[in-house]
Amino acid sequence: MKRLPYPILLVALLALNLFVFLLHIGLGQFTITPWEVAASLIGAGNAEHDFIVHTLRLPRAVLGFMTGAGLAVSGALLQGFTRNPLASPGVLGLNAGAAAAAVLVIVAFTDVPIAWLPFAAFAGAVLVAACSYVLAWRDGMSSIRLVLIGIGIAAVCQALITILLTYGQIRSVSQATIWMTGSLYGKGWEHFTPYWPWFVASMLLAFTLTRQLDVLALGDELAGGLGIRLELKRFLIILASVGLAASSVAVVGTVSFVGLMAPHLARSFTGVSHARLLPAAALVGGLIVLAADLLGRTLLAPTEIPCGLLTAIIGGPYFLYLLRRQKAS
């Protein structure tokens, strides 16, 4: 299949994201046309539209896009770092570690402000990443060992979550259960405020590492021969990946498979260069979560389906397809 020129691809993805973004804000119990949404966003709307757009729906759409973009770039970093196409924040246990720490805060420390959730999720994801890296190290790093150990640690985290939910208070358990389904329901600017610094810092760090990721893809020996400080670069790549995955999980809950699907879809249009891959993956990931949340809100309205369930329904078969394709190759 002939690829689009890269600038045209980015413009097409931006246009598609903008279209879904306007639909996401406009559709709902009170429908607003995309033109009216755009007018409200630039300050030319009426008071009723301004309240619905700016107070109720805009923060949810912004958080949806940022969550998808963060998970996608986190997955692209892990796939490049491990040179394993099956690597993603979910498969390596980062999502589960962040979720376990966040559920611990919700269930066991009910008086803790919501602003502390990103810190707890970050700590949980860092702990899982450190354990996976140490356990996978045996005279060098094996991506297969890293994936298998990540899957095992994710299972342990899931067991810990089950224990917390079993013995927690009913109100806290209900709150944690809703959070874990990966839903943007009820998200507002109060959730955006503690989230954006983590997102921006981690994303900036990720985009400074594109050249190192390209060199690491050549193999450790060649990368070391080219002057790359392997352990430092690995640490920074993991730090950026954990920051993006953990902050996303802390805000929305566990949204599965976005970090696996989006980099693969973007790579089929951009090739292997990470300078081209990361922006495209961010736009694809944002589009996936925005579209999933839009479908979840409108398919069975007024009942909402969490966007995390929809991405899991799509991502599960896609993961099996990747497994089958890798086995064949």
Image (cartoon, grey):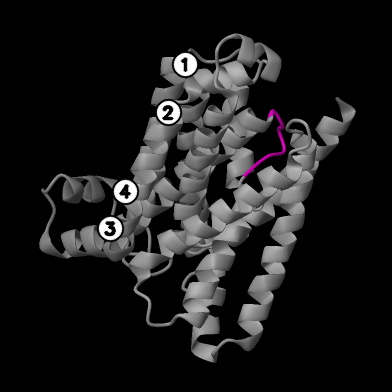
Instruction: Name the spot of residue 125 as percent of width and height, x first.
Output: 56, 54
Q: Nearer the viewer, residue 264 or 136?
A: 136
The three-letter code of the residue at mark 1 reads Tyr
- Can you say which quadrant of the picture contains the N terminus? top right
Distance between the Cα atoms at labels 4 and 2? 16 Å
The residue stretch that appears in magenta: 83-88
State whether residue 279 is above or below residue 313: above
User: Disc number at residue 193?
Assistant: 3
Mark 3 or 1 closer to N-term? 1
Residue at the spot of label 1? 6
Task: Name the residue that disc number 4 marks.
Answer: 197
- The disc at residue 207 is 2
Q: Earlier in the sequence, mark 1 or mark 2?
A: 1
Q: Is residue 129 left or right of residue 32?
A: right
Instruction: Please state which of the two labelled residues, at mark 3 or mark 1, is closer to the viewer.
Output: 3
The first of marks 3 and 2 along the sequence is: 3
Q: Secondary structure at mark 3?
A: helix
> Which residue is at the front of the view, 78 or 302?
78
Residue occupying the far right of the picture: 328
- Where residue 277 appears, as percent x and y from the top left, is 52, 25
Q: How many residues crowd mark 4 within 10 Å: few (<14), some (14–19), many (20+)?
A: few
The verdict on residue 184 being magenta is: no
At 38% from the left edge and 53% from the top edge, which residue is drawn? 63
Task: Name the kind of residue labelled 2 in the image.
Answer: Phe
Mark 2 residue crowding within 10 angstroms, few (<14) / some (14–19) / many (20+):
some
As shown in the figure, which amino acid type bears the numbered disc 4?
Pro
Pick the residue in front: 37 or 136: 136
Residue 210 seen from this side:
yes
